[in-house]
Amino acid sequence: MKKIFLWLLCVSLLIGITGCGNNKKVATAEDLESVNNEIIAYFQTNGTSGYENYVFNYVDEENNVVVVGLLDNSEKEQERFKETIVDSNLIKFVKSEKLVHENDNQNSKDLKTFIRTYEILNVAESNDTNYIYLTIRQFQGEEVQTVKVEKALCPAIEEGKNYEFTLKQKRKPEDNILSIFNNSSIVSIIETDKIGLEQIQDSI
């Protein structure tokens, strides 16, 4: 009888140990895209004027999450986002800086033109059909920003690919995406197959 009890106890422990690790469901790429597209659809329909705390969103397949950038990344604002837009445990909130926009003035002949290469993390439509939102990151850089550019500059741009942005300074920027796009105008956006350290990252 004692042997039977010990055997049952061992079986119960074994089931408990092996069972716990299998209950956690890993999100599929479709799950991530579904959440990401729901966020995009909300802002395409409602715009960002009524929710100015939002900056960007994109799928991070490597970490199995949908990254959402907020100006105020407090717990209160995270809950507000979930209640207003989409509530999902696949969302990872991060603090971001203010959305940057393309500058229009390219008249000064004394300003430097330079090229920076960025990976496109997310592409989203704008309420203005002449523009599009691009969430970008530089190779080996941690900064992620969303920029608003003319559709005519990138009519067939794709997520997950690298593009060379030719920019012309309005004022000398600091060496970060936010400052570069606030103080420069986009001249062209061209797809590149250069990877890693081969990419063009001109000094400013």
Image (cartoon, rainbow, N blue to C red):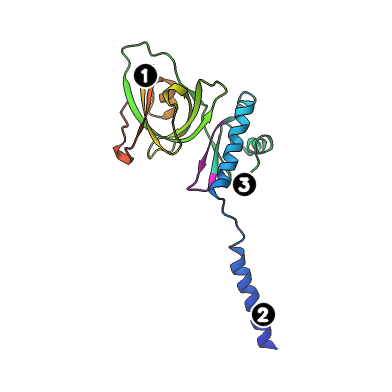
| Magenta range | 55-65
Q: Label 3 belongs to which residue? A: 89
3 or 1: tag closer to the N-terminus: 3
Q: Which numbered dot is residue 169?
A: 1
Within 10 Å of the Cα at label 2, are there few (<14), some (14-19), or many (20+) other Cα atoms? few
Front in this rendered view, residue 44 or 107: 44
Circle 2 residue: 8
Q: Amino acid at mark 3?
A: Asn
Q: Residues within 10 Å of mark 3 (few under 14, many from 20)?
A: few
SS assignment at label 2: helix
Total marks placed: 3
**The C terminus lies in which quarter of the figure?**
top left
Residue 24, x across and y down, in percent: 60, 57
Asked if residue 1 lies in the magenta stretch, the reply is no
Which numbered dot is residue 2? none
Q: Nearer the viewer, residue 110 or 122?
A: 122
Query: Going 61% across and 25% down the picture, which residue do you hit?
Result: 47
Where does the N terminus fall, quadrant-wise?
bottom right
Type of amino acid at the residue the image marks with label 2: Leu
Position of residue 17 measured from the top left corner of the image (x, y, whole percent): 60, 69
Residue 11, placed above or below residue 113? below
Q: Amino acid at mark 1?
A: Gln
User: Which of the two labelled residues, at mark 1 and mark 2, occupies the earlier sequence position?
Assistant: 2
96 vs 157, left or right, is right
Local crowd at mark 1 within 10 Å, few (<14), some, or many (≥20)?
Answer: many
